[in-house]
Image (cartoon, rainbow, N blue to C red):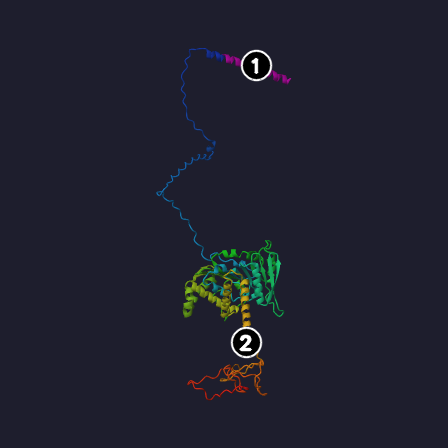
Amino acid sequence: MLLRVRRRFLVAVCVSTLLHAVIVLAAITDIFSLKLPVAVPEIELTWAEVTLLDPDQLQGAAPPPPPPAPPPPPAPPPPKQDGPEAAPKAEEPKKKKPPRPFGARGSTIDQLGPSASNFYLLLANRRLRRLPFAEEAVDVMAPMYDFRYLVHGAGFHPLHDFDYIVIASPNLLDITQTFLAVQTRLPRAELIAGIDRASAAEGFKNMWEQQGDLMIANPVPVEATTEDWDPRWFVLTKDNILLYVRPEYLDQIAEGPKKSKGKTAGGFVSKIAKIRRFARREPRAGLQIVVDDINASLQGAKVKGGGELPFGVPDKIEVMVEASSKPRSIVKLDFPSEEDAERAEAFWSDDVKRAIGDDTKLKFIVGPLYRATNVERDETSLTLRNRFGTVQAREVLKLLGGISQKMNGPTKKEVKALRERREALWQQRKKGKRLPSEALAASEAAAQAAEDHREDGARRDSAKEGPTDQAPAPAQVGEKTPADAPTPDATPPDEPSPEEPRADSDPTPAPSSEDSPPAPKPGATAPSEPAAPLPESGAPDDTAAPPAPPLGAR
């Protein structure tokens, strides 16, 4: 029922709307079609400016920024000018960084040895070999036992065969505690041959073993009576680095570096193959020395003669020497406290200056070095900087060489002989064109040939003189030697003499007086000197007895 009502309502509305629309349309058409005389007034419309308000601005918000201005067009490049009138473009000079002071970065060579060590030394031989005082630098290390054993005993030249040498030790007075590493340019076979020569000269032999990339050997005595006092082993790595280490480090070296180990006693194994990197930290340094944990090492030590030191003992000492003909040196001392550093600076400035001024010898020898030294203090550290001339550097090295000789034993004469032998062998090697084994083999062959020639000459001389059963008695002055007497001929003549000799006479025919000198008197001692000279007047000596005729002579 409701549906029908809605339908009827809708139909009624539509019909009503249609009818009204028709009526309105007819009325509009009639109005526009009629021409009524109605005056329509003219209406002028005036436009007024209306300001629109932004609701955001009314609430306090900032207006949006204006759009950016378009960038100006790039200026066209100036035309290029050809010919001599074209002006060259000026280049702006590059700013160069000022050079870093020598030794400013410090030394890190204490990472190249076992952690138990407190003395470390790095010698850059490849930077020293052309310096005018290179041999004096070698003489500082020449008295050391390991140096004499492995360098001179093997026939190596430290300046030309080795690039870098590392020495580390917890106790320099105990040779068996020394750790030695050498980076060399010699082939592996030549290194092994040289080490074998060095061991044989000391009465040892090396039993080499192959362990992966390593060659290891333990020098053992050849004779049972020889004491095996040195427990260290030789290790030759694949990087051509020779190590001389104690047996407790063999496992770490054989296993190699591992990340899981961290910083352990064998942590230096991964760094020893990077000697060149540590040396490049200060590329101008030829010698680096680090001594640390000094106070711990000197526990219980007393000052000689009693008393106390004028300042505390430093915990660490760093020394660097430049590889130059006029080398710069730097010595850095790290003290336990700032007070010790101040006292050390005052001691250097006052006491040392006074001691040099009171001694005439020190004034002329040490005075110039003292005046050229600059002292810098930074809290607990004291730094001494100096620059030596070539002559001064040579004299300082000679002084250090003398100290090394006293500590290690060889005399100055023996060190000089080692240097002469080293230089002679280098000349035999034709300055590196021959290996040590080749030069030594040629030298031994020449020496053996000379010995054989000498023995052959001695045999020929003894054959000419004839065998002697008994040595002749010493001759008296003025007597004749048996060489002046005729030599009897035991061979009988082919034809007998017309007259037979007497039974008691010598069957040997007597030589003529023209062929041989007269025989000595019977019973006279054969002299080894010629006859006594005549007097100055030239007259014969009347006291001398005339010689007797030979027996059996007619």
Q: Which residues are magenta?
A: 1-26
Choose between 498 and 336: the one closer to the eye.
498
Q: At numbered mark 2, what does the secondary structure look like: helix, strand or loop?
A: helix
Residue lying farthest front? 498
Left/right placement of residue 265 relative to residue 306 reads right
Seen in the picture, residue 92 relative to 62 is either above or below; the reply is below
Mark 2 and mark 1 residues within 8 Å of each other at the beta carbon: no
178 is within the stretch colored magenta: no
Choose between 416 and 423: the one closer to the eye.
423
Comparing labels 2 and 1, the label whose residue is closer to the camera: 2
Q: Which residue is mark 1?
A: 15
For marks 2 and 1, give the CA distance: 173 Å
Q: Earlier in the sequence, mark 2 or mark 1?
A: 1
Q: Position of residue 282 (x, y in %)?
A: 48, 56
18 is within the stretch colored magenta: yes
Work out which quarter of the rendered image holds the N terminus and state it: top right
Q: Which residue is mark 2?
A: 464
- Indicate the amino acid at tag 2: Lys
Q: Position of residue 498 (x, y in %)?
A: 56, 85
Question: For the point 42% across and 70% down, which residue is it?
Answer: 361
Residue 234 visible in the current orientation = yes
Q: At numbered mark 1, what does the secondary structure look like: helix, strand or loop?
A: helix
Question: For the point 48% across and 12% down, which residue is it?
Answer: 29
Q: Position of residue 250 (x, y in %)?
A: 60, 60
- Indicate the amino acid at tag 1: Val
Q: Position of residue 286 (x, y in %)?
A: 48, 60
Kindly indicate the quadrant of the structure image that contains residue 534. bottom left
Seen in the picture, residue 518 relative to 53 is either above or below; the reply is below
